[in-house]
Image: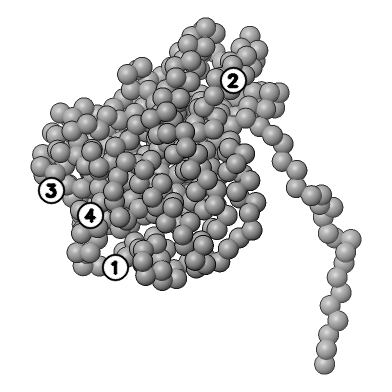
Amino acid sequence: MSQTISINDSQRLPLKPLEIPSKLLLGPGPSNAHPTVLQAMNTTPLGHLDPDFLGLMDEIQSLLRYVWQTENPHTIAVSGTGSAAMEATIANAVEPGDVVLIGVAGYFGNRLVDMAGRYGADVRTITKPWGQVFSLEELRTAIETHRPTILALVHAETSTGARQPLDGVGELCREFGTLLLIDTVTSLGGVPIFLDEWGVDLAYSCSQKGLGCPPGASPFTMSPRAWEKLQRRSTKVANWYLDMTLLSKYWGSERVYHHTAPINLYYALREALRLVAEEGLANCWQRHQKNVEYLWERLEEIGLSCHVEREYRLPTLTTVCIPEGVDGKAIARQLLTEHGIEVGGGLGELAGKVWRVGLMGFNSRKENVDRLIEALAKVLH
């Protein structure tokens, strides 16, 4: 017997077509994407095994090698946000019992600690106050003490705005047979990076910061040394979705189906990377540095200071000290509601103490600095 299902149309919500207000995203990410990148996302999807799409994947790999300055064959874009690429490095490199030494000087160092522990690592840490960096001597002492399988460092600590120097760290790791893993989430595209020259074995990033692309397709790379360790595993990678032994068959010459890729996000990433290559990597780095120095000058003009020593500040993200007696959350909220400008608040130990101001990718422009400073001066005074 057939049944009739009654539908009460009066219960439907009165939805209108999607309308998103335009805002200037000068927080820790996402940043505003270039119009060309957004236009690419509107292109008709292809199948994830279509020959034309596979060719686009090859272009993404080549461009990622360029922006990272590496020849690593195993360089891909993970289908997920930067945290997925972060977990991919841990999942593929860590076996239960591996000693993993992690430099913790901010929120995302702690996230690496959490992830490595979940995969059974014997986690050891070296710590510094938030906003400071590790010296090569401090790292040598820690490696000699712990003899880790992996050393993990955050190159650009998004919570503090500090840049970790990496000269000599790769050589130090090779001296002790240690793999070097680095977080380049807030540095790729806006800060000089030389993975091969530095001897980096594993790195990850995201799409929505220095590359100026919407989030969801995140760079990941592993060196031949890291790949050899993966091949020697006695246990399967504990994360099926992020297992490079499987993903490499989709991104490599075999083209074996693994999952349905976020087609249009890959379109966007390809265009974002193309724009970096078109500008020239050195020019892109120089633009970010020039504009952030202009930001620091303008901040001083209105009586504001930065949390990190100038020598170690990131060109992509600046932590601005909130003046005593000022409600940082209220100021950020006023910037957003009255001026359409987003800035970030502090995380962890820096909560309520700093604003995080990002000048990343397409947003790293002088006019954006002027707009922010004018608005900030109004709401402060």
Q: Amino acid at mark 4?
A: Pro
Residue 226's spot in the image, x, y percent?
23, 54
- Tell me the SS state at disc 4: helix
Q: Which residue is mark 3?
A: 177
**Residue placed farthest to the right in the image?**
10
State the separation of the CA atoms marked 2 and 1: 51 Å
Q: Which residue is mark 2?
A: 367
Mark 3 or 2: the one toward you: 2
On-image quarter of the C terminus: top right
Ranked by sequence position, the earlier of labels 1 and 4 is 4
Label 3 environment density (alpha carbons within 10 Å; few <14, some 14–19, many ≥20): some
Label 4 environment density (alpha carbons within 10 Å; few <14, some 14–19, many ≥20): some
State the separation of the CA atoms marked 1 and 4: 19 Å
299 or 131, which lies in front? 299
Mark 1 or 4: the one toward you: 4
Image marks 2 and 1: residues in contact by CB distance under 8 Å: no
State the separation of the CA atoms marked 4 and 2: 43 Å
Q: Which residue is mark 1?
A: 236
244 or 326, which lies in front? 244
State the separation of the CA atoms marked 3 and 1: 22 Å
Q: Amino acid at mark 3?
A: Gly
- Tell me the SS state at disc 1: loop
